[in-house]
Image (cartoon, coloured by chain):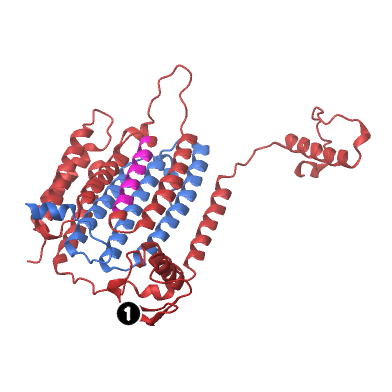
């Protein structure tokens, strides 16, 4: 068959999950959110267990289950919580648990970048806007949630669409994934030949390279090193004798990939961010509405201040009551 | 049973390849997270939460990319996630500026207040 799990089981579980999510979505009347969340969690957990039974030999480690449970649970809370501030805070929890998933996928740099950029910057911006765009209750009033927050729009149709997509996606996904070929061995250490300072530093710290000794690459393909110490014979350092820390780290891999294999991408990212910043500034600029009289007054105050700078001794107060402009001066209001 | 326990607690080091079935677990989490984001985007009527749900979908894409990158022992996936984060930041800045602009006009965050914008 080639299926990891039989599609019929999948479809049944997704119907159950869709039912749970549909119940969990906010409603104006009593909404049994906890019950819905439990049903959805049951369905998701059953899929994971079914997947785990098939993949008995290839289970991910325990942390995967912890992080994915946390992440998916708080993602459910993001879409069901009626208060936007709590939704944003639950989204931070989702970001933290996907950072955990990145860590066990040995993508350390991306995990921390995700925490810094997402949880630290983007979500704080969201929180600020939520605070800006929510009216505080008046003195003595009880806070009421806005009507658009307490009620979901088209929960049944949306859940059907979403889970239809998920069912198709996962059936295609798990069909024959067992037979995916394992990738061939990677020359993990070939990058070391491009980092002579690191190699030298590590070898010196481990006392393999003595004072005044040099190291050079014997063969770029296998990245074997030749050690020349003063007063000793030139020797070849096979990979078995390498110190533990003489390996390419995730950040180094990523740096080479980003700056050597894809040069210029960082600049493009910078341009995108710059354009977004300009756009945001232009969009959210506050336009002050002034009538003609106020504009004229503003212009006169400005003109007087300028004159006062040139001729400070004329003795007039800078804070005079506004006088209406002479009507004959038609262009006066547009200063 | 002990075999199962050992597999559960195993921490595989980076250069070791992992099996397609392990990859399937991560892809499953990613697909479910994406679907939750999609459902949230359709059902919620608060503009801020709608954009929060797009961020959820970005997260799901990032998890899938990193899992595939780990499976193929290839770093292009991680490089691409940097771009996802960049685009998410740009999108958040623009979207929030728009939301502030719209809120000043109508004093409401409801997406349905803006239905006269239909083409």
Within the image, what quadrant is residue A154 found in? top left
Residue A113 percent location from the top left of the image: 41, 54
Q: Does A89 lie within the magenta span? A: yes
For chain B, give the colour.
Answer: blue
Q: Which residues are magenta?
A: A86-101
Residue A308 percent location from the top left of the image: 87, 38
Q: Nearer the viewer, residue A245 or A8?
A: A245
For chain A, give the colour.
Answer: red
Within the image, what quadrant is residue A230 found in? bottom left
Above or below A54: residue A265:
below
Q: Is the C terminus of chain A in the top left, top right, bottom left or bottom right quadrant?
A: top right
- Residue that label 1 marks: A222
Q: Nearer the viewer, residue A261 or A202?
A: A202
Determine the residue positioned at 52% across, 60% down.
Answer: A270
On the question of residue A5 being in view, the answer is no
* Chief secondary structure of the magenta portion: helix
Q: Secondary structure at mark 1?
A: loop
Residue B29 percent location from the top left of the image: 24, 52
| Left or right: B34, with A131 as reference point | left
On the question of residue B97 being in view, the answer is yes
Determine the residue positioned at 47% across, 29% down.
Answer: A135
Q: Residues within 10 Å of mark 1 (few under 14, many from 20)?
A: some
Determine the residue positioned at 34% across, 46% down.
Answer: A96
Above or below A322: residue A2:
below
Q: Does B43 lie within the magenta span? A: no
């Amino acid at each position: 068959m080639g299926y990891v799990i039989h599609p019929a089981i999948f479809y049944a579980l997704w119907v159950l999950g869709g039912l749970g999510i549909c119940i969990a979505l906010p409603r104006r009347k009593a909404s049994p959110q906890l019950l819905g969340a439990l049903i959805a969690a049951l369905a998701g957990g059953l899929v994971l267990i079914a997947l785990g039974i098939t993949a008995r030999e290839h289970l991910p480690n325990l942390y995967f289950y912890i992080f994915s449970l946390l992440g998916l649970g708080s993602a459910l809370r993001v879409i069901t919580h009626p208060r936007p501030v709590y939704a944003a805070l639950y989204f931070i929890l989702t970001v933290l648990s996907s950072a955990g998933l990145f860590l066990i996928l040995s993508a350390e740099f991306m995990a921390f970048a995700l925490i810094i950029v997402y949880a630290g910057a983007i979500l704080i911006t969201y929180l600020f806007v939520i605070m800006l765009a929510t009216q505080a209750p008046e003195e003595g009033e009880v806070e009421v949630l806005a009507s658009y927050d307490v009620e979901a729009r088209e929960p049944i149709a949306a859940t059907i669409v979403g889970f239809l997509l998920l069912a198709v996606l996962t059936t295609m996904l798990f069909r024959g994934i067992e037979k995916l070929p394992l990738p061939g061995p990677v020359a993990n250490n070939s990058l070391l030949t491009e980092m002579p300072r690191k190699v030298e530093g590590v070898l010196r710290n481990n006392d393999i390279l003595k004072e005044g000794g040099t190291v050079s690459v014997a063969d770029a393909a296998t990245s074997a090193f030749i050690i020349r110490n003063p007063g000793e014979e030139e020797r070849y350092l096979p990979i078995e004798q390498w110190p533990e820390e003489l390996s390419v780290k995730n950040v180094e891999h990523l740096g080479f990939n980003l700056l050597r294999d894809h040069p210029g991408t960082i600049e493009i990212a910078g341009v995108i961010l710059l354009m977004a910043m300009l756009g945001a500034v232009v969009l959210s600029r506050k336009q002050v509405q002034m009538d003609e009289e106020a504009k004229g007054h503003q212009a006169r105050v400005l003109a007087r201040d300028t004159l006062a700078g040139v001729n400070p001794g004329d003795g007039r107060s800078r804070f005079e009551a506004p006088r209406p402009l002479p009507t004959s001066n038609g262009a006066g209001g547009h200063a | 049973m002990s075999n199962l326990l050992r597999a559960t607690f195993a921490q595989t080091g980076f250069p070791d390849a992992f099996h397609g079935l392990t990859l399937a677990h991560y892809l499953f989490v990613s697909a479910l997270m994406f679907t939750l984001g999609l459902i949230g985007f359709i059902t919620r009527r608060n503009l801020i939460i709608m954009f929060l749900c797009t961020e959820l979908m970005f997260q799901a894409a990032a998890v899938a990319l990193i899992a595939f990158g780990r499976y193929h022992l290839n770093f292009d996936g991680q490089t691409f996630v940097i771009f996802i984060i960049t685009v998410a930041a740009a999108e958040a800045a623009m979207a929030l500026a728009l939301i502030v602009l719209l809120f000043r006009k109508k004093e409401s965050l409801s997406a349905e207040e803006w239905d006269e914008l239909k083409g």
